[in-house]
């Protein structure tokens, strides 16, 4: 009991000490985020995974493209995970080192997730803010377009795009990015409608600031909180979409790889007693997605003023 | 209400037309036609084949012909790869299968998801709640392409309870695993949505009033809590339906069920353009129809919405 009181008093004292300088919205949010254990732990795990994908290659004995001829074709007997052979995660059926492959897959999947999400965030924020700020007929037409795009079965269109324009990672980015900004634009529009009648926007209008400048300088910065929340929830969604496509064999092409492609390979050879080929990529995939969802939830609690 | 229905249909039709136009132009923007192969055909033969399928005509002409065929006779033309089959036949073969396991997955996702979310909300912060939340987060990071191989490992290879694939006219043994693999992540989302919206409803003033005037919990729940807290679930049904249809691609690949997804992926790898387009349009049409129904349902249930 006393311990708790002491802790409380310390927190209060800290708050008092800080109140001299004043706390910004972001500092406030950071404190609230840090109080959420699941989110903080997830952030550390995720940082560790990212760090591993950059540092890991220096510890690899085999490069991802080199074939261990001993293990080729007899992965079940020779290619199991071991320190001695240098295959920390074992090998795949072709005798390639799974440790290096998983690192490569992690890099690519995370990159697709982050880049895809940034495309979506950029397009969605600008589109939603413009639509919400301009209002009237423009708003109606812009949102109608979003409605129409939303009711298109986008995975099918994405597959169509990849087949038609060739299977390249660039096309994958464009396809996923262009199709996933829709939700973002709706959320941003809703927030913009709230913001638009605030005094500081009126002040900007009265002083003759152009519409474009008001949107980019006054509206968008005030939306960053909600954008950050949905961006963290967008990343796992995009990683899932990419894995789905790669799983079908239409996404990332050999010799590159991604989580989806590795899971597919591992799942395909499961009946030959080579579980590690599925389990290592799967573990990375599942743990990372978990982390993203927890961080997203934590950020929402920290930044979304609704549930305080 | 009538106005709203007309307005919604007014969006649905152009959506479908845009979908058709976009997929049609995509097909024709592709380098190489459906008849380019490693051994080039003699020019005369190629010209004959193209004339037969009408590929020598200008593109707008081809498009109007195609559109006309789709609208008037529901005819998606012949398959470019399987010369003795039409797209209609292929869809007629795959569609009932997809519909069957899709329907059951939908039922399972709703039938398990809503009660799970409701129990978690009512017993908030008990072990039931934590279990339900844990299950739903777990199911969200295990998408169908991960669930499918895991299910096969457990139920076919280890336990040897269920057949690892095939359809067999859709008898229940062959139905169980596809339905589980397809429905889990949607079940999880529905449970999460139900839980959070029900928590919101339970904290409202009118529920407090109902409690304070001494209504039994059961009546409060069924009469006052259930309906408003299901509204967000209804608006999620549209996206869930799209996901289920898209998921059929994975299900057909893994369990060899032979539904639409199988033909779609096959045609994607074969560049069988007419089949791809036919399936995209049918799926798109269904999606649009379904989101229309979901929206109308929403407007009907929620008295606050009057368009």
Image (cartoon, coloured by chain):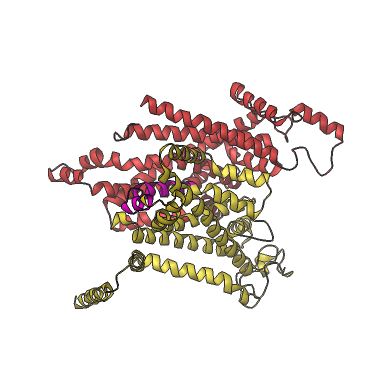
Chain colours: A yellow, B red
Residue B137 is situated, as x and y percent measured from the top left of the image, at 42, 56
Q: Nearer the viewer, residue B245 or A110?
A: A110
Q: Residue furthest front?
A: A207
Question: Residue A280 occupies which quadrant of the picture?
Answer: bottom right
Taking the spot 48% from the left edge, 47% from the top edge, the residue there is A127
Task: From this view, report whether residue A52 is shown above or below residue A228.
Answer: below
Task: From this view, report whether residue B174 is shown above or below residue A216.
Answer: above
Q: Which residues are magenta?
A: A182-205
Residue A165 is situated, as x and y percent measured from the top left of the image, at 68, 46
Q: Is residue A141 magenta?
A: no
Residue A99 horizontal side relative to residue A151, left or right:
right
Residue A122 is situated, as x and y percent measured from the top left of the image, at 50, 54
Q: Is residue A232 visible?
A: yes
Q: Is residue A187 magenta?
A: yes
Question: Residue A301 occupies which quadrant of the picture?
Answer: bottom left
Q: Nearer the viewer, residue A177 or B284?
A: A177
Residue B24 is situated, as x and y percent measured from the top left of the image, at 64, 35
Q: Residue furthest top?
A: B72
Q: Is residue B159 visible?
A: no
In the rendered image, the quadrant that contains the C terminus of chain A is bottom left
Residue B294 horizontal side relative to residue A251, left or right:
left
Q: Nearer the viewer, residue B210 or A20?
A: A20
Task: From this view, report whether residue A40 is shown above or below residue B276.
Answer: below
Q: Main secondary structure of the magenta part?
A: helix
Residue A53 horizontal side relative to residue B34, left or right:
left
């Amino acid at each position: 009991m006393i311990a708790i009181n002491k802790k409380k008093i310390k927190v209060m004292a800290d708050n008092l000490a800080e109140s001299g300088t004043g706390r910004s919205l972001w500092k406030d949010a950071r404190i609230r985020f840090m109080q959420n254990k699941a989110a903080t732990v997830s952030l550390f795990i995720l940082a560790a995974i990212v760090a591993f994908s950059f540092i890991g290659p220096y510890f690899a004995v085999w490069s991802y493209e080199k074939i261990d001829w001993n293990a080729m074709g007899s992965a079940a007997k020779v290619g199991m995970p071991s320190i001695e052979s240098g295959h920390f995660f074992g090998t795949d059926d072709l005798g390639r080192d799974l440790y290096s492959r998983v690192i490569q897959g992690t890099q690519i999947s995370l990159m697709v997730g982050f880049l895809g999400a940034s495309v979506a965030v950029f397009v969605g924020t600008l589109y939603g803010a413009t639509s919400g700020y301009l209002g009237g007929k423009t708003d109606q037409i812009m949102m109608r377009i979003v409605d129409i795009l939303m009711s298109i079965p986008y995975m099918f269109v994405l597959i169509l795009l990849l087949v038609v324009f060739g299977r390249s990672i660039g096309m994958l980015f464009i396809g996923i990015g262009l199709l996933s900004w829709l939700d973002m634009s709706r959320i941003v529009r809703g927030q913009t409608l709230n913001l638009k009648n605030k005094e500081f926007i009126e002040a900007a209008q009265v002083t003759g600031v152009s519409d474009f400048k008001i949107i980019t300088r006054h509206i968008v910065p005030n939306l960053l909180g909600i954008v950050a929340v949905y961006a963290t929830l967008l990343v796992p969604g995009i990683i899932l979409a990419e894995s789905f496509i790669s799983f079908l064999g239409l996404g990332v092409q050999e010799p590159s790889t991604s989580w989806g492609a590795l899971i597919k390979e591992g799942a395909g050879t499961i009946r030959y007693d080579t579980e590690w080929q599925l389990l290592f990529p799967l573990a990375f995939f599942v743990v990372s997605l978990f982390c993203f969802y927890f961080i997203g939830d934590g950020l929402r609690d920290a930044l979304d003023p609704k549930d305080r | 209400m009538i106005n709203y229905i007309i307005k919604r249909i007014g969006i649905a039709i152009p959506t479908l037309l845009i979908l058709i136009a976009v997929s049609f132009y995509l097909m024709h923007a592709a380098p190489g036609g459906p008849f380019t192969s490693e051994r080039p055909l003699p020019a005369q033969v190629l010209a004959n084949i193209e004339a037969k399928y009408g590929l020598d005509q200008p593109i707008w002409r081809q498009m109007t012909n195609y559109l006309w065929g789709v609208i008037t006779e529901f005819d998606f033309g012949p398959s470019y790869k399987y010369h003795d089959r039409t797209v209609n036949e292929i869809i007629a073969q795959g569609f009932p299968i997809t519909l069957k396991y899709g329907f059951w997955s939908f039922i399972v996702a709703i039938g398990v998801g809503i009660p799970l979310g409701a129990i978690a909300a009512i017993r908030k912060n008990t072990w039931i709640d934590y279990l339900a939340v844990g299950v739903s987060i777990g199911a969200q990071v295990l998408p169908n392409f991960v669930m499918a191989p895991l299910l096969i490992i457990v139920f076919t290879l280890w336990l040897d309870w269920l057949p690892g694939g095939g359809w067999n006219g859709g008898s229940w043994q062959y139905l169980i695993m596809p339905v589980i693999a397809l429905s889990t992540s949607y079940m999880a989302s529905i449970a999460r949505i139900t839980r959070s919206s029900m928590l919101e409803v339970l904290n409202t003033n009118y529920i407090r009033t109902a409690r304070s005037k001494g209504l039994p919990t059961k009546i409060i729940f069924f009469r006052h809590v259930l309906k408003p807290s299901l509204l967000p679930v209804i608006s999620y049904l549209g996206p869930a339906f799209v996901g289920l249809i898209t998921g059929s691609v994975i299900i057909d690949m893994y369990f060899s069920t032979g539904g639409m997804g199988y033909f779609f992926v096959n045609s994607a790898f074969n560049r069988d353009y007419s089949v791809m387009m036919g399936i995209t349009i049918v799926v798109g049409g269904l999606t649009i129809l379904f989101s229309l129904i979901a929206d109308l349902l929403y407007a009907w249930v929620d008295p606050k919405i009057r368009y």
